[in-house]
Amino acid sequence: MTIEITMPALSPTMESGTLSKWLKSEGDSVAAGDIIAEIETDKATMEVEAVDEGTIGKLLVAEGTEDVPVGDVIALLLEDGEDKAALDGAGTQAAEKASAAKADDSASDDNDEPAERPTRPAEPMIADEEEIPAGTEMVKQTVREALRDAMAEEMRRDDMVFVMGEEVAEYQGAYKVTQGLLEEFGDKRVIDTPITEYGFAGLGTGAALGGLKPVIEFMTFNFAMQAIDHIINSAAKQRYMAGGKVDVPVVFRGPNGAAARVAAQHSQNFASWYASVPGLKVVAPYSAADAKGLLKAAIRDPNPVVFLENEIIYGQSFDVPKLDDFVLPIGKAKVVRQGSDVTIVAYSIAVREALAAAETLAEEGIEAEVVDLRSLRPLDLPTVVQSVRKTNRCVVAEEGWPVCSIASEISARLMEDAFDYLDAPVLRVSDEDTPTPYAANLEKLWLLSPDRIVKAVKKVCYRD
Amino acid sequence: MDSRFLCNRIYILFLLKTGRLMAKTSPPRSSKTSGSNAKALPEYKASRDEMLDFYKQMTLIRRFEEKAGQLYGMGLIGGFCHLYIGQEAVAVGFQSALKEGDSIITGYRAHGHAIVSGASPKSVMAELTGRSGGIAKGKGGSMHMFDPKAGFFGGHGIVGAQVPLGTGLAFAAKYKGTDNVVLTYFGDGAANQGQVYEAFNMAKLWNLPVIYIIENNQYAMGTSVARSSGQQELYKRGESFGIPGKLVDGMNVLEVRAAADAAVKHVREGNGPILLELKTYRYRGHSMSDPAKYRTRDEVQTTREERDPIEFIKKRLLEDGAEEDMLKSIDKEIKDEVSEVADYARNAPEPDPSELYTDILVES
């Protein structure tokens, strides 16, 4: 049977090309791999190899022809022993057949919108439940201790959980978060790594692919920049690219956000970077109880979780419920102060600043409701909207840069979902839009503060 | 810089320019010709059936990839598509040395590895055409395909990323107390990524059961090893980490298998990682849109004629008394199978639009 040679697609973007040169003439025999023509694509001049053996029967497109569409028949090849008579009328027939076939094949890849766009399934709603049963005994604990206990409890519960990072074992943690773990679990499960973030973030992700549940500690998230390719390209996307065939149950945790007097490279908040990536869960708790309940949830979660802690609040004490297994749902915000005049949305250390601001505001007769997001992806917008429906005003406080931030996201989403309930524009209060300065006075000017939150609240309440 | 060294370099350039010294660009014909560490490796003593199996698997990959190239030309496969043609002996030889529970991981030139690890050719081709019958439901494409049940962990599009990932799989194998090994494939291009050496260091530090396989096909996209690597004997790249290395002729499936057996034994017995450099060659461009102007037509042609891995095993089979007709009928069967695979991949339905939103997260 006559073999049709069609204009090939030779790049991801090529739709047509120029047939620059024929390197074979009619009557020439060709073997698979022989170059038969040169074609100029949108990227380069490419040599086209024959795929089949035979004799060139007919060249249908002349040298130098421009804009030959991909898929058009450009030549006919006679198979061994085939007669030239087979070519009679074959050109037109072939061309017709080819365009019909093309129409058939490309029926679905035209730029047409699908007849009906699928609806994105709604985020699963997390019911408002009492997180801590009434009457539970509370103990004072620092965030640091709560995080350590969370890891220890999960390690006791599941042999597949291990902790890996720089100085996590013998040194007991650069910030002492992993204190005591080596002693209890041994060096098989509490592993000091070399200084090799890119390497151990990848190794941890690979270990998760292999069925383990790694807790990968970054000494700080500043150093995770070296490893962000594995967090995003390897961990976050693997499941989707595999059509659901793999699980990547890895936790990347460590301190994030402004530290104290360490200047631009060691003092910054990456929350919005990670929160923008589908395939990740992102958690940034404030209190010790939330840190404990959410880290336990993160370790059990079958998805990759970025768990953002804060160095400044590691030593702060909170009430933590004395329960055998205190786990909180990822994706649920929490109203941490009731109020009726304005909603202040915050997460991580900004919750502390928001609560301080609320105290000052109360003295002036403004009752602020403070919502601690706790999780940044999935984001619990319903809880924020519910509060704004009540207060009709909102300020988002964030210890981080203002541009493309979590605050920007909250602000935009309130425009979409709560516009009719707003009596004033949503305001964002954040760190200044500059690198973190070293000098004490400049750093203070740069950083989010309760004072700035108070000012913004007064503005949305028209009390300034 | 040492002035003597500079003089030597100028002298060598002079010799090159005057043609008195031939620049050696083509790969060594066998491992015997290069490297002090590259003693002649023994060949695996394969039975006729084993040789036939190698022949079938390599031919299947070759025909599959040629067909993929054709479908790409017809616009049925989109994006980047990197073909394995020429390198078949590497994946086939290594896979035959593995046992249940062992796993493999590779980069973006993944179709051959997926097939030899047990993925059905139909599901691989349908992945290339972006159809629902694809191994990743059409959501991964040529560079990202996974079959964890078959021990195949991708399929990774970021050059070199699979090396720490593979090292992590090996960490998991050891942590669980198994004696399984992990083959971590990467190319001569990836061999210059920093994360490869971060992984080497940890693999040796913790004695992980990983076999690093550099498929040196001589060109990182358009940049030859000579233009990209200070130390061009890539099998020595593990030495400063305490990882032993060997050079292997990647066009000879029997040598590949023998090297694989030795490496698997070394690693399975708890001796830690090992590095093998497989000298191989890709006949096609880096991807479908690569005009391959960085090498001569003659270089490609000579390799095809003199070192083709399929012709090699075919010759051995004929010398062993296999009938040419039988090989021809195998060829025919494979050609028919691949036609059927292509028909399936062309006609399978596209993923349901609702698939856009699935497999992002799994329910806790």
Image (spheres, coloured by chain):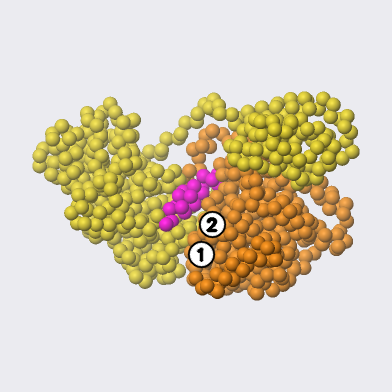
Q: What colour do you see for chain B? A: orange
**Mark closer to the chain start, 2 or 1:** 2
Q: Position of residue A140 (x, y in %)?
A: 22, 59
Image point 59% across, 44% down: which residue?
Answer: B80
Residue A207 at x, y = what percent?
50, 59
Magenta-highlighted residues: A226-243
Q: Which residue is denoted by mark 1 in the rendering? A: B197
Q: Which mark is residue B108?
A: none
Type of the residue with mark 2: Gly
Mark 2: few/some/many CA within 10 Å (<14, 14-19, 20+): many
Q: Quadrant of the N terminus of chain A?
A: top right
Q: Is residue A143 visible from the viewing direction of this image?
A: no
Residue B160's label in the rendered image is 2
Q: Which residue is painted at 45% across and 61% down in the image?
A: A200
Q: Quadrant of residue A89?
A: top right
Q: Identify whether B240 is placed above or below A35.
A: below
Type of secondary structure dominating the magenta stretch: helix
Q: Chain of mark 1?
A: B
